[in-house]
Image: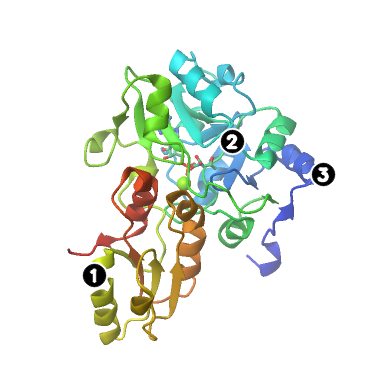
C-alpha cells in the first residue's frame, strides 16, 4: 500500500461519529475507542462485513468476536435467554469492562460467534463508543484493533500503525482508561466461568452472583479453550520479552550486557542502582499500583518493542490477586519465565 492510503485517526466529534455509523451500515470497518482497548468494528448482523474483520486482523475464522451493544435492554436482541445472573451483572457493571457469553439467538450470524451457539456481549463505558452504538442503532462486532497475536492498541495512533491500511475510519477518543481487555464471564452453561481476567475482578463478580466462579486456565482444560486470549503466546511484542523476578534483575542485566545484548527494561520495584547501568538502552518505570500499571502496559510494551532491541526484560510483579490481570497479560506477552 502506498503511504497515502494509510488511514489517519480523526477526532471523534458528532460529524465523525455519524460518518462512522454510516460506514458501518455499508458494511465497512470502523476502529473506535472503548475504555479497555480500541476495537475494530463491523455491523454484527452483516456476515460479509464481519469476514472483513478477520481478513484485516489475520485472525482465524473460528475465533469468536464480542458484540458491542448500546444498552442492557438490547441483550434480548442477541441472547436466546437472559439468565438472572446476566441481568444482575449487566445492571451492576454495564456500561463497563465486562463481556458476557450467553446462548445466542438463531439469527445471530455464525461468522460472529466462530461457529458456536454462544455469543459474547458487552456494553462499553466510553462516550465515543456509546455514541457510535446509539447512532448505528445496532450491535457492532469488534475484536481488539490489532493484528492477530499482537499487542492490543490503547491509542488511536497504535491502530493507524498496525491496521491503517485495512480500516475505513479510525475514531480518535484519546488513550483508553482501563488499558487491558474486558473480563469475560461465560454464563452459557450450568456454572458461571471466568474465561479472561480483567479490570472487574473475580471477587466483584462473585459478590454479585453469590456464587463461586470456575476459573478457566490453559492448564486446567486445554480442550475447552475457545478464547484466543487464552493461548500461551498472545498480545506479544516482536522483540523477545522475558519476565524476571526483582531479585534476579541485576544479575540478568549484567549477563546480557556481557553478551553484548541490547536490552530495555519494564521496571517496577527495581532500585535505581540496578537501573543506572549505563548500557541499558531504555528503562520504563511502571506505576506501582496494578490498575495504573495495566493502563500503561500495552503502550509501554509497544514503545520498547519499537526500539528493535535484543530483549525486553519485564520485572515480575507480585503474585497476588490485585496483580492477576497484569500477570495474565504479561504471561502472554513474554516468551518464557527466567529460571529462579
Ligand atoms: O475489552 C474487550 O473485550 C475488547 C474491546 C474492543 O471491547 N475486545 C476484545 O476482543 O478484547 P477480542 O476479540 O480481542 O477478544 C474477545 C475474546 C476472545 O478471546 C474470544 O475468544 C472471546 O472473547 N469470545 C467471544 N465470544 C465468545 C464465545 N461465544 N465463547 C467464548 N469466548 C468468546
Ligand atoms: Mg484481542
The residue indicated by pointer 1 is 248
Q: Which quadrant of the view contains residue 39?
A: top right
Which tag is nearer the camera, tag 1 or tag 2? 1
Depth check: 219 or 278 in front?
278
What kind of element bears circle 3? Answer: helix
Depth check: 242 or 10 in front?
242
Up the image or down, 47 lies above or below 72; here it is below
What kind of element bears circle 1? Answer: helix
Asked if residue 83 shows in the view, the reply is no
226 vs 85, left or right, is left
Residue 129 in the image: x percent, y percent?
66, 39
105 vs 251, left or right, is right
Around disc 1, counting alpha carbons within 10 Å, would you say few (fewer than 14), some (14 to 19), or many (20 or more)?
Answer: few
The residue indicated by pointer 3 is 15
The residue indicated by pointer 2 is 124
Between the C-alphas of marks 2 and 3, the distance is 21 Å
Between the C-alphas of marks 1 and 3, the distance is 53 Å
Residue 89 in the image: x percent, y percent?
48, 23
Q: Counting residues from the N terminus, which is met first, the one under dot 1 or under dot 2?
A: 2
Q: Counting residues from the N terminus, which is met first, the one under dot 1 or under dot 3?
A: 3
Residue 311 in the image: x percent, y percent?
35, 73
Q: Please give the name of the residue rendered at 61% of the width and 21% of the height, measured from the top-left corner.
A: 74
What kind of element bears circle 2? Answer: loop
Amino acid at each position: 500500500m502506498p503511504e497515502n492510503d494509510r488511514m489517519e485517526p480523526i477526532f471523534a466529534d458528532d460529524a465523525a461519529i455519524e460518518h462512522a455509523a454510516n460506514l458501518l451500515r455499508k458494511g465497512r470497518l470502523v476502529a473506535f475507542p472503548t475504555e479497555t482497548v480500541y476495537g475494530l468494528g463491523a455491523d454484527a448482523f452483516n456476515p460479509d462485513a464481519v469476514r472483513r474483520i478477520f481478513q484485516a486482523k489475520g485472525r482465524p475464522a473460528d475465533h469468536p468476536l464480542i458484540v458491542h451493544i448500546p444498552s442492557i435492554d438490547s441483550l434480548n436482541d442477541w441472547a436466546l435467554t437472559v439468565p438472572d445472573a446476566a441481568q444482575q451483572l449487566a445492571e451492576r457493571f454495564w456500561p463497563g469492562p465486562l463481556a458476557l457469553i450467553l446462548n445466542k439467538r438463531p439469527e445471530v450470524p455464525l461468522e460472529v460467534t466462530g461457529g458456536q451457539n454462544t455469543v459474547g456481549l458487552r456494553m462499553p463505558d466510553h462516550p465515543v463508543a456509546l455514541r457510535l452504538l446509539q447512532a448505528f442503532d445496532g450491535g457492532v462486532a469488534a475484536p481488539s484493533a490489532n493484528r492477530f497475536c499482537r499487542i492490543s492498541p490503547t491509542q488511536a495512533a497504535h491502530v493507524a500503525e498496525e491496521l491503517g491500511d485495512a480500516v475505513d475510519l479510525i475514531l480518535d477518543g484519546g488513550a483508553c482508561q482501563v488499558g487491558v481487555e474486558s473480563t469475560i464471564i461465560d454464563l452459557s452453561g450450568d456454572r458461571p466461568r471466568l474465561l479472561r481476567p480483567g479490570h472487574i475482578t473475580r471477587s466483584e463478580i462473585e459478590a454479585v452472583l453469590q456464587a463461586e466462579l470456575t476459573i478457566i486456565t490453559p492448564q486446567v482444560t486445554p480442550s475447552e479453550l475457545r478464547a484466543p486470549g487464552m493461548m500461551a503466546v498472545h498480545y506479544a511484542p516482536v522483540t523477545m520479552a522475558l519476565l524476571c523476578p526483582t531479585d534476579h534483575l541485576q544479575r540478568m542485566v549484567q549477563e546480557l550486557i556481557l553478551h553484548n545484548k541490547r536490552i530495555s527494561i519494564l521496571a517496577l520495584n527495581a532500585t535505581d542502582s540496578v537501573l543506572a547501568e549505563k548500557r541499558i538502552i531504555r528503562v520504563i518505570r511502571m506505576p506501582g499500583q496494578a490498575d495504573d500499571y495495566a493502563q500503561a502496559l500495552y503502550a509501554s510494551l509497544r514503545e520498547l518493542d519499537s526500539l528493535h532491541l535484543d530483549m525486553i526484560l519485564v520485572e515480575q510483579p507480585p503474585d497476588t490477586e490485585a496483580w492477576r490481570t497484569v500477570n495474565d497479560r504479561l504471561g502472554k506477552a513474554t516468551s518464557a519465565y527466567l529460571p529462579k
